[in-house]
Image (spheres, grey):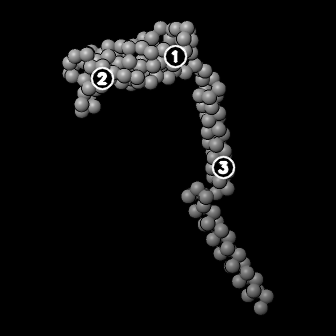
Amino acid sequence: MTDRRASSDAAASTRADGTAAASQRLDERYGNSRASRIRLRALMWSLGAFIVVVFGAWVLWAGLLAPAANVNAVDVAHTVVDEHTVDVTYQLTVDPGTAAMCALQAQDDQHSIVGWKIVEIPASDTRTRELTESVRTVDTAVTGLIYRCWLP
């Protein structure tokens, strides 16, 4: 009876070893081994560290190292002079001693841009000033607007 039990235990042990070995081979084949889990964990930590570094660099560049000067422009009025000219009056606020540039546009009744002009505004001693510029058009304009202003 002992021989039979020993042989059945040996057979069960052999089957368990065979099943474990087959399972281990399948895990390795499909990337479910301990080494692949360690590589995946290292990759995720590296990716997380990279994202933190990039975000920190962006915060420094965009927030802390950005120029302190800013520019603000407001439309005041427009006057259609004739079918090929519109005068745009706007108020520009910029730090004294700072030059700026503005893009002005003229639109027709379909909101199509029929005129465009980029204006270089020299530095001044005053913070806020009112300016008027003429914009040439290819068709009759119904309005003149500031597209945007920026610091050169």
Near mark 1 (Cα within 10 A), the count class, few <14, some 14-19 or many ≥20, is some
Near mark 2 (Cα within 10 A), the count class, few <14, some 14-19 or many ≥20, is many
Which label was assigned to residue 92?
none
**Residue at point 63%, 71% (across, down):** 19
Q: CA distance from mark 3 to mark 1?
A: 57 Å
Amino acid under disc 1:
Thr
Side of 67 relative to 76 (left or right): right
- Which tag is nearer the camera, tag 3 or tag 1? 1
Q: Position of residue 120 (x, y in %)?
A: 42, 11
Side of 2 relative to 39 (left or right): right
Judging by the rendered image, the residue that carries numbered circle 2 is 106
Q: Is residue 88 visible?
A: yes
Judging by the rendered image, the residue that carries numbered circle 1 is 128
- Which tag is nearer the camera, tag 3 or tag 2? 2
- Which tag is nearer the camera, tag 1 or tag 2? 1
Q: In terms of image quadrants, where is residue 141?
A: top left
Mark toward the start of the polypeptide (3 vs 2): 3
Amino acid under disc 2:
Ala
User: Please, what secondary structure does the residue beneath circle 2 have?
Assistant: strand
User: Please, what secondary structure does the residue beneath circle 3 have?
Assistant: helix
Q: Position of residue 8 (x, y in %)?
A: 71, 83
**Residue at point 65%, 26% (across, down):** 64
Judging by the rendered image, the residue that carries numbered circle 3 is 41
Near mark 3 (Cα within 10 A), the count class, few <14, some 14-19 or many ≥20, is few
Mark toward the start of the polypeptide (3 vs 1): 3
